[in-house]
Image: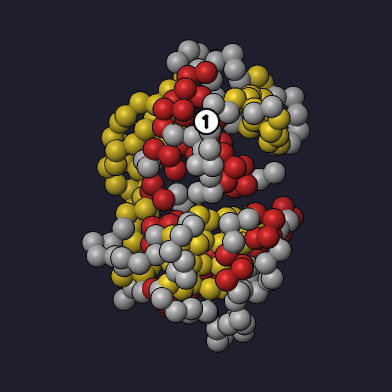
C-alpha cells in the first residue's frame, strides 16, 4: 500500500466546460466524468494516455488521488487525479509539493478545477505544461521566511519507535490500528501538513527506519482533526512547536 493511498484512508481523500489537452501529444479528448469518482480502485482502472485540465464539472465532492502503476517505472508510472480542487491543489500536484507550501498569486481564479494525468512518460512535466497553457499559471521554488511547525520528540529515543529489522516498507490496518513497518517519522509529514495547513519540518533526529503503530481515535470519513493528531503524536512521544524558518516554498505566478 502506498502512502498516498494510506493518506486517503486516514485523512479522507484529501474551468465550466471541459478543456481536454490535445494536439502535439496525441491525447484523446474523450474523457468520461466517471473517471473522476473518488474511488481508488476505479481510479487505478482509468485508461492511459489522458491529460486533462478543466474547470470543475462538480458542485459536490472534492479530493485527489495519486498512485504509481509500478515501482519499476519510477516517475513515469505516476498517475494523478483531482476533482473540484483549488488552484493551489492543482499546482501542488503538478509540481510535486504539498498545498501548505504553495504561495498563490495575488489574484487567482474563484472557480475550482478537475485534472487527470495518466500519460506514460514525463507526467509532471506535461501536467505543468498543460496548466500553463490552459490556466495561464506557472511556478518556481523560492526560500522564504515562513511560519512552520517543528516535529520534535518529547523524550530522547521515544519507546514507541522500534528499530526495524524488516527490509521493506509496509502499512497495514487491523483492529482500528495502523501498523507502519520500516518507516521514518518523517513519513507522517504530509498528513500533518494537510491537516495543520502549514509546512512541517522534521526535527526528531530519528533518522533510522522504525516499526510503530497508530491507533485510530477519530470517527467518520473526514479523518483526524488537529486535536486527534496531537493526541496521536503525544502517544508516539512527539510534539509540534511553532517557529519561523526559511523554507522552500512553491511560488505561483501568471505565465508570461
Q: Residue at x 60, y 76 (%)?
A: 31
Q: Residue at x 66, y 45 (%)?
A: 2
In front here: 84 or 94?
A: 84
- How would you rate the neighbour count of disc 1 (Cα within 10 Å): few for under 14, some for 14-19, many for 20 or more? some
* Residue 196 in sight: yes
Residue 76 quadrant: bottom right
- Residue projecting furthest to the bottom: 23
- Residue projecting furthest to the left: 106
Q: Please, is residue 67 above or below residue 138 in the view?
A: above
Q: Where is the N terminus found, in terms of image quarters? A: top right
Disc 1 element:
loop
Q: Please, is residue 208 above or below residue 94 in the view?
A: above
Q: Please, is residue 91 above or below residue 189 in the view?
A: below
Residue bearing mark 1: 218
Question: Is 56 on the left-hand or right-hand side of 183?
Answer: left
Display coloring: secondary structure
* Residue 93 in sight: no
Residue 146 quadrant: top left
Q: Residue at x 31, y 76 (%)?
A: 256
User: How far across and down, in percent of the image, does residue 142 sit?
Assistant: 34, 53
User: How far across and down, in percent of the image, does residue 226 sit?
Assistant: 41, 32
In front here: 145 or 98?
A: 98
User: How far across and down, in percent of the image, does residue 181 sit?
Assistant: 69, 30
User: How far across and down, in percent of the image, does residue 52 sit?
Assistant: 53, 73
In front here: 12 or 24?
A: 12
Amino acid at each position: 500500500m502506498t502512502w498516498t493511498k494510506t493518506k486517503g484512508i486516514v485523512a479522507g481523500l484529501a474551468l465550466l466546460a471541459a478543456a481536454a489537452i490535445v494536439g502535439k501529444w496525441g491525447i484523446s479528448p474523450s474523457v468520461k466524468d466517471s473517471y473522476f469518482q473518488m474511488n481508488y480502485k476505479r481510479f487505478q482502472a482509468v485508461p492511459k494516455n489522458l491529460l486533462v485540465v478543466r474547470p470543475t464539472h462538480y458542485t459536490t465532492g472534492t479530493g485527489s488521488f495519486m498512485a504509481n502503476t509500478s515501482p519499476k517505472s519510477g516517475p513515469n508510472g505516476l498517475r494523478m487525479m483531482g476533482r473540484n480542487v483549488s488552484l493551489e491543489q492543482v499546482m501542488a500536484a503538478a509540481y510535486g509539493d504539498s498545498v501548505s507550501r504553495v504561495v498563490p498569486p495575488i489574484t487567482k481564479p474563484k472557480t475550482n478545477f478537475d485534472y487527470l494525468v495518466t500519460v506514460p512518460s514525463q507526467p509532471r512535466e506535461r501536467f505543468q505544461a498543460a496548466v500553463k497553457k490552459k490556466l495561464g499559471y506557472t511556478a518556481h521554488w523560492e526560500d522564504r521566511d515562513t511560519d512552520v511547525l517543528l516535529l520534535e520528540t518529547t523524550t530522547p529515543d521515544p519507546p514507541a519507535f522500534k528499530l526495524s529489522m524488516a527490509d521493506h516498507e509496509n502499512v497495514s490496518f487491523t483492529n482500528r490500528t495502523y501498523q507502519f513497518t520500516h518507516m521514518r517519522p518523517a513519513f507522517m509529514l504530509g498528513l500533518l501538513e494537510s491537516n495543520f495547513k502549514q509546512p512541517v519540518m522534521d526535527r526528531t533526529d530519528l533518522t533510522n527506519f522504525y516499526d510503530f503503530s497508530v491507533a485510530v481515535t477519530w470517527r467518520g470519513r473526514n479523518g483526524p482533526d488537529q486535536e486527534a493528531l496531537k493526541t496521536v503524536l503525544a502517544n508516539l512521544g512527539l510534539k509540534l512547536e511553532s517557529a519561523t524558518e526559511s523554507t522552500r516554498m512553491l511560488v505561483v505566478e501568471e505565465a508570461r
